[in-house]
Image (spheres, rainbow, N blue to C red):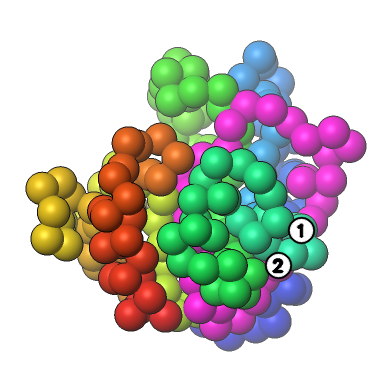
Amino acid sequence: MGGNPASICREIYAETRGFYEAHASALKDAALGFRILYGPPLAQAPVLFLGYQPGGKIAEGGVQHETWPVLSEYATEAWPLAVRLRETLGKEVVERSTGLNAIFFRSKSVADWGRIERSLRRELEMFSLARAERIVRTLMPRHVVVIGLGTVDHLTAGVAETLGTRRVLIKRGELWGAPATGIIHLSGARIRREDRERLAAYLAVQQ
């Protein structure tokens, strides 16, 4: 899919602001804002990290409704997930990465999201997924790393692999035209150091 990545992403931000404003009254207390990109819209980045959905805290000033960070927040922030990704893939790779949510609209929890009226929730999800796909097909990353094995199951069919250990560490497949690997959620799962090393070795080959 062609087009200037920054222009297309600015268009998606504008569409999302309009869509959110039109639906905020129906969402009531569940209207918590949205988050799209976690880094700049880099074409053919070595990695695009894809999370499922942002949490329920709106950033002060609402800048996240307007644009993306100048640098990948997976490279600059101190969240447990960002730290683990730098440890696993290496800081240099993460600095050249970007990130995205599959569902743009914030929720405090999966349970809270599930309490939104079904047809409205489905509309929010379909709006997000169509635009997440457009971003991925525009940026054409060399590899999509999907955060969380459950997220893979929501988005595509993946082949489970243990990488020689006793537990499934990855699910391998394709998503929106790009090679994709779903990984165990590094900040939410108890993962042994040797398993993280196996995961790092596997992902290094994919870059």
Q: Which of the two residues, 196 or 123, is positioned nearer the viewer here?
A: 196
Q: Is residue 26 left or right of residue 80?
A: right
Q: Which residue position holds label 1?
A: 69
**Placement of 130 over or under 59, stated as above or below:** below
Q: Is 188 located above or below residue 75 in the figure?
A: above
Q: Tell me what residue is drawn at x 66 percent, y 16 percent.
A: 28
Q: Amino acid at mark 2?
A: Pro
**Residue range (magenta):** 40-67
Task: Write down the quadrant of residue 122 in the picture.
Answer: top left
Residue 89 at x, y = what percent? Answer: 46, 66
Most distant residue in the front direction: 193
Residue type highlighted by circle 1: Pro
| Frontmost residue, 133 versus 166 | 166
**The C terminus sits in image quarter:** bottom left
Mark 2 and mark 1 residues within 8 Å of each other at the beta carbon: yes
Nearer the observer, 80 or 106: 80
Q: Position of residue 155 (x, y in %)?
A: 33, 52
Q: Residues within 10 Å of mark 2 (few under 14, many from 20)?
A: many
Apparent side of residue 204 relative to residue 85 in the rendered image (left or right): left
Measuring 70% from the left and 33% from the top, which residue is drawn there?
A: 33
Q: Is residue 63 magenta?
A: yes
Q: Report which residue position mark 2 lands on.
A: 40
Q: Residue 172 in the image: x percent, y percent?
A: 23, 65
Q: Residues within 10 Å of mark 1 (few under 14, many from 20)?
A: some
Under circle 1, the secondary element is loop
Q: Using the numbered discs, state the Cα–Cα distance from disc 2 to disc 1 in whole angstroms.
A: 6 Å
Report the residue at 49% width, 58% height from top.
87
**Location of residue 175 in the rendering, given as x and y in whole percent from the top left corner:** 35, 66
Answer whether residue 95 is magenta in the image: no
Q: Which of disc 1 and disc 2 is earlier in sequence?
A: 2
Question: Does residue 176 show up?
Answer: no
Q: Residue at x 26, y 53 (%)?
A: 195
